[in-house]
Image (cartoon, rainbow, N blue to C red):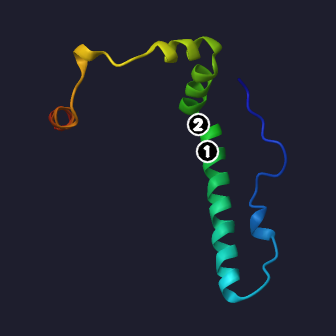
Amino acid sequence: MHITTIGNANATAANAPVRGSSAASAESARIRNDVDAARNTALSALNNDRFRVMLEQISDPGASGTLMTMGADSQNVVDFNTALSRYAENSK
């Protein structure tokens, strides 16, 4: 799978004019910052090899059938506290 970015991926929202009161300006600035952060996160994810491999795996038509048949194995259920203590033991 190859992902190509189309258009200008730079901060286009930062160039938008701000109108109105200072409260509206602050809100507009916050929205612009949120949009820029979301854009940067998306571009980072698209350029991340681990994310790309995971995306290829889950977009495979055969993977959806495998995911649908996955269920909870009643013999290997671990409660949260047990999992937490095992994690703590392995982190030492």
- Secondary structure under tag 1 reads helix
Query: Depth check: 61 or 3 in front?
Result: 61
Residue type beneath disc 1: Ser
Quadrant location of residue 74?
Answer: top left
Residue type beneath disc 2: Asn
Residue at image point 16% right, 32% down: 82
Circle 1 packing at 10 Å, graded few (<14), some (14-19), many (20+), is: few
Q: Which mark is residue 12?
A: none
- Secondary structure under tag 2 reads loop
Q: Which residue is mark 1?
A: 44
Seen in the picture, residue 63 relative to 55 is either above or below; the reply is: above
Residue at image point 77% right, 86% down: 20
Is residue 5 left or right of 58 when viewed as pictured? right
Instruction: State which quarter of the image contains the C terminus.
Output: top left
Q: Which mark is residue 48?
A: 2
At which x and y percent is residue 7? 85, 48
Tags 1 and 2 in contact by the CB under 8 Å rule?
A: yes
Is residue 90 left or right of 7 when viewed as pictured? left
